[in-house]
Amino acid sequence: MNPARSALLTDLYQLTMVQAYLEGGMEDVAAFEFFVRRLPDERGFLLAAGLEPALEFLEGFRFGPEEIGWMKSSGRLRPPFLERMEDLRFEGDVDAMPEGTVFFADEPILRVVAPLPQAQIVESRLIQILHYETLVASKAARCVLAAPGKLLVDFGMRRAHGADASLAAARASYLAGFDGTSTALAAPAFGIPVYGTMAHSFVQAHERETDAFLAFARSQPENAVLLLDTFDTEAAARAVVEMAPRLRDQGLSIRAVRLDSGDLAAHARAVRAILDGGGLREVRIFASGNLDERALLDLADAPIDGFGVGTRLDVSSDAPYLDCAYKLQEYAGRPRRKRSEGKATWPGRKQVFRRSDADGRMAGDIVALEGERAEGEPLLRPAMRGGKRLAEREPLSTIRERAKRELARLPEPLRRLGTRPPYPVGISRGLRDLAGRLEERVSRF
Amino acid sequence: MNPARSALLTDLYQLTMVQAYLEGGMEDVAAFEFFVRRLPDERGFLLAAGLEPALEFLEGFRFGPEEIGWMKSSGRLRPPFLERMEDLRFEGDVDAMPEGTVFFADEPILRVVAPLPQAQIVESRLIQILHYETLVASKAARCVLAAPGKLLVDFGMRRAHGADASLAAARASYLAGFDGTSTALAAPAFGIPVYGTMAHSFVQAHERETDAFLAFARSQPENAVLLLDTFDTEAAARAVVEMAPRLRDQGLSIRAVRLDSGDLAAHARAVRAILDGGGLREVRIFASGNLDERALLDLADAPIDGFGVGTRLDVSSDAPYLDCAYKLQEYAGRPRRKRSEGKATWPGRKQVFRRSDADGRMAGDIVALEGERAEGEPLLRPAMRGGKRLAEREPLSTIRERAKRELARLPEPLRRLGTRPPYPVGISRGLRDLAGRLEERVSRF
C-alpha cells in the first residue's frame, strides 16, 4: 500500500463532515485558501513549493474498492454517502502562486473553489503536501543565500521523517537552488542530479585508510570523493598527497575530499594547505556534519567548495513546522470568517499584489479581495479549472530559475537572513471592510 | 511509485561503496549497530520503535528492473555490480530491543550481521525507519506520562512530514500509549482506533452555529463531538445546553465538545460549569491546539477528559531529530572503531544489560560485549536469522503493554519528564579494554 495514493490518508472528520454535508444538501460552491498565519520567528520569508504534487493529488483523488470497504466497516459512514464516494472526483478550480514564489504571513498561496464536499475532503492531504515542501524549500533558500557560489547537496534522507519526506525534500531543496541530493531515487523520480561521497564504514572496513582510498579511486575513477575524518583529518590529507603519484600512474584522480567532524574551517584551511603543497590544487574540499544556514555563514571564509546539508534541512530543525491553515473563506457566495482567539482569518477570495522598487526589489504586498484592483503584480494565477490543469507540469528547471530571481529580489535584510524589519504586507480597504461587516453580523447573531 | 518500496531510496554512496566492496572481494561478515549517540537535551529517555517496519523492509529488499535500469544509466555503476544487484537479497541476522523498550544513549537498539555489501546497502533506509518511529514514540511516551488517565489522540497528520510520516506517527504514538489517531488510514493499515471531531469549516459553512451542531449530531448520533470555538466558546456551550432537550427528543446525544483556542484551562472550567448546570454532566470535554507534554502538564488540573496532540507530536517539535547512527563495529571478525572528533564509537558486537531495584524500577544499564556476562536482563534479542524473522509480527497491543510496563519502571525523575540526574549507563570492562586496544593499534598505524 502506498499511503500517499490513498484517499483515506485524511483525518476521519473530513469523512464524517462530508457525510453530514451531503445529508444536509450542502453542495454549493466553497472557496478554501491555504496560507501561513504567522512566520516562524526564525524566518523572514517563505518560498512556496508543493503545487505540482498538490495538483497531482487532486487529479488522482478517488476512493478505491478497499477504501470504500473500510469506510463501510467503520460504523460511522452509511450507504448513501459511500455510493457518492465511489464516484467522487475533484472537479474544482485552483489558483495558486507558482512554486518558487516568495511569500509572507496571511498571503494565500493556493485557493480551491469547488463544491463544498470536494473542497473539504482534500483538506488534510493538501495541507500535508504544501506544508512540507514549503517548509523545506524555505529552509533551503536560506542555505542558498548563506553560501553563494558553493555547491549545495541535500544529504538528509536518513533522518527525514519517512520515505516520501526524503524525496520531497530533495525536490524542494533543488527547486530552491540546491545543486542536487544524495538520495538516489530523486534522479529517476524528478531528474535531480545525485551526488555521492564515501562513508566512514568504507574506511573502517579496510585494513588501512589508504587501502580504502585506493579502492574507491579505482572504482570511481572520475567521481571519487574521499572521506578524511575517520581517524585523523590532516593525516588523511597527507596520505592523499602521498598516494597521488601512484593514482596518476594508473590514470586515476581524486575529485574531492570530505570533512565531516571537528572545526570544519580549521580543518579546511589545513587540508587546503596540505593539498596545495602536494600539487593537488584541483582537488575540491567538501564539508558536512550538522550544517545549516548559520553554519554556512560561519564557514563563508573557509576554503570549502561545497556542502552536504542534511538533517537540519530535511526536518527544518529550527522551525520544524509552519503555522499554516486551509480555511473556508466563502460558501454559497457568502464570505465566511473564523474568529477563534488568536486564529481569526481574513474572509473572502483573495489576491496578493506585490510592488517592486526601481531596482526590481520587492517593496511591499497588499492582500486584497479577488475582484479588487491594487498596485503591483498579482501573485495567484489560475492553475486548474474543473479538475483539469491549465498547463503542462512546470519543469523543475523553470521553478529553480523563478526561485533564483525571487531570492535576488528580496529586500536586503531578508537576503541577509534577517527577520527585521518584517516585510510590509498590507490588507486592502475592501478586505478590511468585508471583515468588519462580517464582524457586525456575527455580533448580532 | 511507492518510494518506501524502492531499493533506490538510499544515499548514492551506498551503491558506489557496495560496488567497490564487490570489486575488492570484500564480502566477509560485518556487524553494524544502530544507536543514539546522545539524547536530545529535552529527553531523559527514548522508547524504541520501528523494528517491525524495519524487518519488513529487510525481508522485502530487492532491486526491480526499473531500478537496475536507472543504475545502468547513471554512469557510475557497471555491469558486474548490476548483475549482482539483480539477485541481492538481505540474508543477514538481526538482534534488537523489542519495540516499546526504553533505552538511552550509546545503547544499540538493533544490530545487523550480514555480508558487508548486504549490511551496508540497507543503511540509509533502516536508519530512516528506526529514527522516525523512535522519535515519535519517545515524544508520545512523554505525553502519556504527562496526562495519566486522559484520552490521547494523535491529530498530527496534516503537518507530519509526508504520507509515511503521518502513518508511522499514528503507529508510534499508539504503541507508546496513545488511544488512537485521527488518521483514517491508520485503521485499515494497523488496526489503530480512529477518532474524529468537527472542523471550523463545518461551523462556518452553516448559516448558524446551532444549525451546524444539529446537523452533525443527527449525522453522528453516537459520536458527535462539537467544536465550540469558531466564534465564542462559552456562548457555544450555552447553545449546546439549549439544544439538548430537542436532541433528546430525537434520540440524539452529544458525546463531547472540543476546545481549540484561547486559554484552554479557563475555557474548560467555564464550559464544564455551563454543561453541568444544564444537566449535561455526561458530555466530555476534549481539547486541542498546539499541545505537547508541557501543555498537558499545565492542563493537568483542568476539567478536560481528552486531548488531540498534533503537530508537535508528529514532528517532535522540541527535538525534531535524534543524533543516531548505524555504524560498522566489526568486519571479518575484527572489531572496528571510528574516532572522528566528537563522534567516536564503541567497537564490537554489544549487548545491553539492565538492572532493576527491589520495586522493579530500572536501576542502571551496562553496555557490554556480546559474549560478556553482566548483571541484569539482556535487552537485545534475536529477531531475524538468515533473512527470516524468528517470530510472527508482534501485535501492537503486545507492544503497547510492554511500553506501559517500561514507562512504569522508569526512575521517578524521568517519569516526571526530568532529564536530571541522567540515567546511569556504564561501559563494561571488556568493552573499555577492547576500545583501548584498538586505540593503540590505530595510533601505531
Image: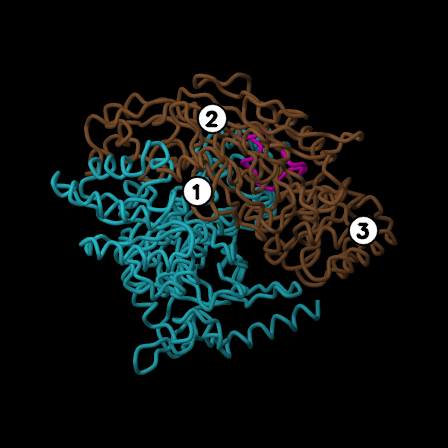
Chain colours: A cyan, B brown
Q: Given contact means CB atoms under 8 Å apart, are the residues at marks 3 and 2 in contact?
A: no
The residue positioned 28% from the left and 38% from the top of the image is: A210
Q: Is residue B205 magenta?
A: no
Q: Mark number for residue B56?
A: 2
Q: Foreground residue, B81 or B445?
A: B445
Distance Cα–Cα, label 3 vs label 2: 43 Å
The residue positioned 65% from the left and 51% from the top of the image is: B292
Q: Amino acid at mark 1?
A: Arg
The residue carrying mark 3 is B303
The residue carrying mark 1 is B339
Q: Is residue B272 above or below residue A217?
A: below
Q: Is residue B184 magenta?
A: yes
Distance Cα–Cα, label 1 vs label 3: 53 Å
Could you classify mark 1 by the number of other residues whose Cα lies within 10 Å: few (under 14), some (14-19), or many (20 or more)? some
* Helix, strand or loop at mark 1: loop
In this picture, which residue range is highlighted in magenta? Answer: B175-190
On the same chain, marks 1 and 2? The answer is yes
Could you classify mark 2 by the number of other residues whose Cα lies within 10 Å: few (under 14), some (14-19), or many (20 or more)? few
Q: Residue B425 occupies which quadrant of the picture?
A: top right
Looking at the rendered image, the disc whose residue lies closer to the viewer, 1 or 2, is: 1
